[in-house]
Image (spheres, grey):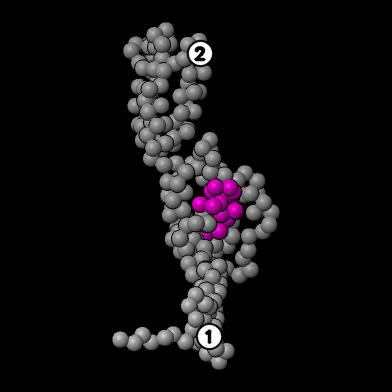
């Protein structure tokens, strides 16, 4: 049986004829360019900043007033005491302070709640400002919505539970005077204004937390058992 001899020597490099090489190049190079272009276009799309979903969280009602605008000095007044979202800060205290400032503003045909909605974002800095900017667009329709979201973010239920326990376990400290104990107890109540304790429960908790001498003094002042 005859063996067909190869046209190329053994162990030698096979050289593609120039014409064939040009044909291979004409087929491969356009495909490579297409792949490169697709990769560049994909990277460009990934790096392009998204525009959908951006917008203010607060939806402001239509204002039927001529020449209405918030003056710069009013914004500076709000920005003078910003809320940063720190653990030591109380969102309830910030809300109360903000309401005191904005309650003095009066504009014809402009409800006060609208003014508060417009100005509140300017009272935030740091983590609090970041929180607001991440809120979904058009998710806050009223002042009540804003207060609820703000308080829930920076005064979570776990913190409420902790402070309520602190109030319930109140005990007069050693060498603490009656007035000092009373001020400390009131400070605990102010730290958690939504504690839910009735006045009777507050008095009972404070009385039971006092030492025996102070309890006796209160009983004597009340003309019997307080």
Q: CA distance from mark 2 to mark 1?
A: 103 Å
Looking at the rendered image, the quarter that the C terminus falls into is top left
At mark 1, the secondary structure is loop
User: Where does residue 129 sit, x and y in percent of width and height?
Assistant: 56, 51
Mostly what secondary structure, the magenta segment?
Answer: helix
User: Where does residue 207 sit, x and y in percent of width and height?
Assistant: 38, 18
Residue 101 visible at all: no
Q: Which mark is residue 159?
A: none
User: Where does residue 148 sit, x and y in percent of width and height?
Assistant: 42, 49
Q: Nearer the viewer, mark 2 or mark 1?
A: 1
- In terms of depth relative to the viewer, which is nearer, 186 or 79? 79
Can residue 117 be found in the magenta stretch? yes
Looking at the rendered image, the quarter that the N terminus falls into is bottom left
Q: Dot 2 corresponds to which residue?
A: 177
**The magenta segment:** 112-131
When the figure is inspected, residue 116 is found, relative to residue 210, above or below; the finding is below
Picture mark count = 2
Which residue does the image show at 48% across and 78% down from the upper left?
10
Which residue does the image show at 49% across and 28% down from the upper left?
187
Which residue does the image show at 52% across and 74% down from the upper left?
39
């Amino acid at each position: 049986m005859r063996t067909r001899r190869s046209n190329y020597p053994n162990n030698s490099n096979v050289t593609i004829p120039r014409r064939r090489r040009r044909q291979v190049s004409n087929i491969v190079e356009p495909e490579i360019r297409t792949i490169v272009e697709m990769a560049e276009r994909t990277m460009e799309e990934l790096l392009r900043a998204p525009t959908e979903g951006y917008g203010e969280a607060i939806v402001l009602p239509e204002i039927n007033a001529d020449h209405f605008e918030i003056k710069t000095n009013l914004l500076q007044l709000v920005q003078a005491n910003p809320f940063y979202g720190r653990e030591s800060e109380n969102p309830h205290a910030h809300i109360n302070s903000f309401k005191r400032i904005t309650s003095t503003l009066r504009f014809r045909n402009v409800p006060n709640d609208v003014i508060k909605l417009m100005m509140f974002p300017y009272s935030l800095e740091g983590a609090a400002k970041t929180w607001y900017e991440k809120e979904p667009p058009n998710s806050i329709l009223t002042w009540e919505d804003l207060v609820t979201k703000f308080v829930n973010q920076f005064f979570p239920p776990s913190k409420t539970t902790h402070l309520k326990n602190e109030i319930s376990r109140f005990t007069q400290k050693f060498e603490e005077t009656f007035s000092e104990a009373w001020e400390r107890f009131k400070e605990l109540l102010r730290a958690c204004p939504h504690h839910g304790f009735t006045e009777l429960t507050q008095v009972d908790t404070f009385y039971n937390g006092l030492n025996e001498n102070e309890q006796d003094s209160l009983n004597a002042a009340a003309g019997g058992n307080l």
